[in-house]
Image: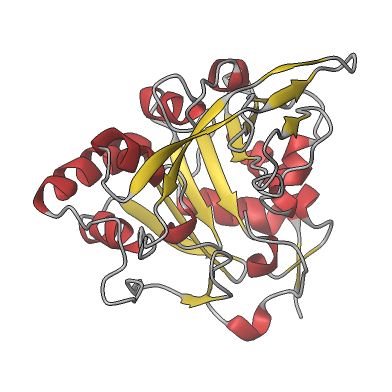
Amino acid sequence: MKILTQEQIATAFRALGVAAGDIVFVHSSLSSIGHVAGGGETVVDALLEVLGPSGTLAFPTFIFSQNQNPTPIFDPQRDPSEMGQISEAARTRPGALRSHHISGAVGALGPSAAEITSHHGTLVWAADSPFWKFYELDARIMLLGVPYLRCTYFHMLEQLVQVSYRWWRKVDGRIRYPDGTEGPLPAVIFSPYPDFPGNDFNKLGAMLEAQGLVRVGPVGNAVARLFSAQAALKIGLEAYRQDHDLFLKSDGQFTQLQDGVMVGELHNEKTVYDPSLMYPRASKAG
């Protein structure tokens, strides 16, 4: 199996359309890329190299393992991201900042990191969250080896239109500060009802691609997609007005995308060019 270097990965990001000074929010799967020398650290190095000192890298650092805990405790400094090795490599970089949310925390590196992460209200995707900052700053959303199904930015559209298949669930969370003391960190989660058929965000992604709003290309064996946060919200809201099932699976099936092959178990789907070239790893995509 070919071993990929930082130089090769950076070249692929530039070809995809990532530019110096951009703000990029990345959902990623390291195993989709293939065998990377240095693993997730190398991918983060390549992203920061391309973005340059004026660019900002943002990434999800969500935590799901405490979902069944009635009073979960979030330690922003110590709790690892459960969104894959690239996310965790970025989270642990010197200077990385992390928003304070019991399940949907976002991390960032770069000059816009403080603006993105400094405030995160009780709702993951509300106007006082990093996700709305991505819209205000017209960040690029990158899906690196994962399909639109894993694009959490699209949940913000569900919340904006108040979809009927989700409900508000209160969580009495707590936060642990660097000195070991604790304080309240309440959250309200927009959870699906038990009969929820499942999201199919590939529908909206396919619409964006049909309108030429997505850059698609290879990063190693991973299918990478890059698009504007503002364009996605605009097209998504317009499409929802025409079809209130826009974000849901139809007939139990996911929308097939034009580029790549979707593989992996439910909630850990990945998109690659050749499944046989995936690098075997135990961690989840993120």
Q: Quadrant of the N terminus?
A: bottom right
Given the current orientation, which residue lies at the most extreme front position?
A: 70
Image x and y of residue 15, in percent: 49, 54
Residue 43 in view in this figure = no
Image x and y of residue 41, in percent: 79, 48
Total marks shown come to 0
Q: Nearer the viewer, residue 274 or 162?
A: 162
* Picture layout, residue 95 above or below residue 3: above
* Picture layout, residue 89 above or below residue 57: below
Image x and y of residue 260, in percent: 45, 75
Q: Nearer the viewer, residue 117 or 10?
A: 117
Residue at (60% x, 41% y) in the render: 60
* Picture layout, residue 161 above or below residue 270: above
Image x and y of residue 281, in percent: 77, 69
Given the current orientation, which residue lies at the most extreme bottom position?
A: 276
57 to the left or right of 237: right
